[in-house]
Image (cartoon, grey):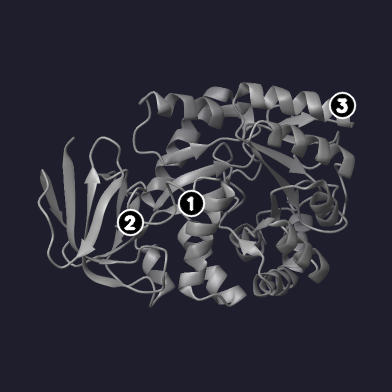
């Protein structure tokens, strides 16, 4: 075993809202995990890297991503070939990592490309990319949100969704993404439209849990949010109109909430003269309600995770740091609480918290190096030229 000593840095480990000065840790070069940690006097290692008193914090975990979508074409990437989509997806992964995202969870991708890229990455064929938890295609009703043959299994009964989920799991899906409501980007449906039924989603959740996998529900309005909760999903994605009663149920069930604030914010912010008026209106009309509803859910104790819905209009793959800003400025979180969404909570949702999320002994050395103190100013994580390390090795 060879080892590397990282020394002389200001450590925010993700566990507490404190900075540890003159910190150090040692990584096992083979496993990429932290094997010792401390401050001041440091032991010897085979190699030493001096981080020059900069700030070290955990890499971001983004649990709602669409690497096969293109934020500049506004069509979800549906009009491209599989080859074009795969090349773009690879580049999008690299952009994620450069921005400080060291782990992503797919939440619906065309051609099952995230599953295929995950397999290639595991073989060492992809460079400078974050770890991937792939979802493959989503599950929607005929005519429902995201209805497209390249990106969706269309299901219209418990039996149909049972077979489709089993097919997805066979192909390598590590998350089952269900469409419980309409949404912003699909013409003709709305956030308040219920789509997959409780019985259909409950069947999907059961099949996912049989294989030790999670189920997430795209659920923006009601009664779809309530339907998804009653079906037992592990996370509500978006949740713009979550009620006090639903938030209480989420706390009791341990359901996570991924608000994807930047996806909703960016459409009215940048799309007024580019996107269809109906799409801009849907997002703009919901925005203030979203901030109020999710802020209330957070104060009630709902576990908030970090996801950006990357790939939606004007919402690129470098915007996870911007989500941190919105979590603080729009929901009233402290920077520490915002980072917990990405670190501790997102790791727990993905069931990877034994190895990811915080910089502790026994966990992977996935971290970003910043010039400014991220606990004093949430804008510090938006630094463009940050250093990014994955499993103890510098990637950018």
- Which corner quadrant of the image does residue 53 belong to? bottom left
| Mark 1 and mark 2: Cα distance apart in space | 12 Å
Asked whether the beta carbons under mark 1 and mark 2 sit within 8 Å of each other, the answer is no
- Graded by Cα atoms within 10 Å as few (under 14), some (14 to 19) or many (20 or more), the crowding at tag 1 reads many
- Report x, y in % for residue 113: 56, 28
Q: Earlier in the sequence, mark 3 or mark 2?
A: 3
Secondary-structure class at tag 2: strand
Q: Is residue 21 above or below residue 75?
A: below
Secondary-structure class at tag 3: helix
Taking the spot 70% from the left edge, 70% from the top edge, the residue there is 297
Res 84 seen here: yes
Q: Is residue 353 above or below residue 158?
A: below
**Closest to the observer: 41 or 101?**
41
- Report x, y in % for residue 325: 50, 69
- For label 3, the residue is 159
Q: Earlier in the sequence, mark 1 or mark 3?
A: 1
Asked whether the beta carbons under mark 1 and mark 3 sit within 8 Å of each other, the answer is no
Q: Earlier in the sequence, mark 1 or mark 2?
A: 1
| Mark 1 and mark 3: Cα distance apart in space | 34 Å
Taking the spot 31% from the left edge, 51% from the top edge, the residue there is 388
Secondary-structure class at tag 1: strand
């Amino acid at each position: 075993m060879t080892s590397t000593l990282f020394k002389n840095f200001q450590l925010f480990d993700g566990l507490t809202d404190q900075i540890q000065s003159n910190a150090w840790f040692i990584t096992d070069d083979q496993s990429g995990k932290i094997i010792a940690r401390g401050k001041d006097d440091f032991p010897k290692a085979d190699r030493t890297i001096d981080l020059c008193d900069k700030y070290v914090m955990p890499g971001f975990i983004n649990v709602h991503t669409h690497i096969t979508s293109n934020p500049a074409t506004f069509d979800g990437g549906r009009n491209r070939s599989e080859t074009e989509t795969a090349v773009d997806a690879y580049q999008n992964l690299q952009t994620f990592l450069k921005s400080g995202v060291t782990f992503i969870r797919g939440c619906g991708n065309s051609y099952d490309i995230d599953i295929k890229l995950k397999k290639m990455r595991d073989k060492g064929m992809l460079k400078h990319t974050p770890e991937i938890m792939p979802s493959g295609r989503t599950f929607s009703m005929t005519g429902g949100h995201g209805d497209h043959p390249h990106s969706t299994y269309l299901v219209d009964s418990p039996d149909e969704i049972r077979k489709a989920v089993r097919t997805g799991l066979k192909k390598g899906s590590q998350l089952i993404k269900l469409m419980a409501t309409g949404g912003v980007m699909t013409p003709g449906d709305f956030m308040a439209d219920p789509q997959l039924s409780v019985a259909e989603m409950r069947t999907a959740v059961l099949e996912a849990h049989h294989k030790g996998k999670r189920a997430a529900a795209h659920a923006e309005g009601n009664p779809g949010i309530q339907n998804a909760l009653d079906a037992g999903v592990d996370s509500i994605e978006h949740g713009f109109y979550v009620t006090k009663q639903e938030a209480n149920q989420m706390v009791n069930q341990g359901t996570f909430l991924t608000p994807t604030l930047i996806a909703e914010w960016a459409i009215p912010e940048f799309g007024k003269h580019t996107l269809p008026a109906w799409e801009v209106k849907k997002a703009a009309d919901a925005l203030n309600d979203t901030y109020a509803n999710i802020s209330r859910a957070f104060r009630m104790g709902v576990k908030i995770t970090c996801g950006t819905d990357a790939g939606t209009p004007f919402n690129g793959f470098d915007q996870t740091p911007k989500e941190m800003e919105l979590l603080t400025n729009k929901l009233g979180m402290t920077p520490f609480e915002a980072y917990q969404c990405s670190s501790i909570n997102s790791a727990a949702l993905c069931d990877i918290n034994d190895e990811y999320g915080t910089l502790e002994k026994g966990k992977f050395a996935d971290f970003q190096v910043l010039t400014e103190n991220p606990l004093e100013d949430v804008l510090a994580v938006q630094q463009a030229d940050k250093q990014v390390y994955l499993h103890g090795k510098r990637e950018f």
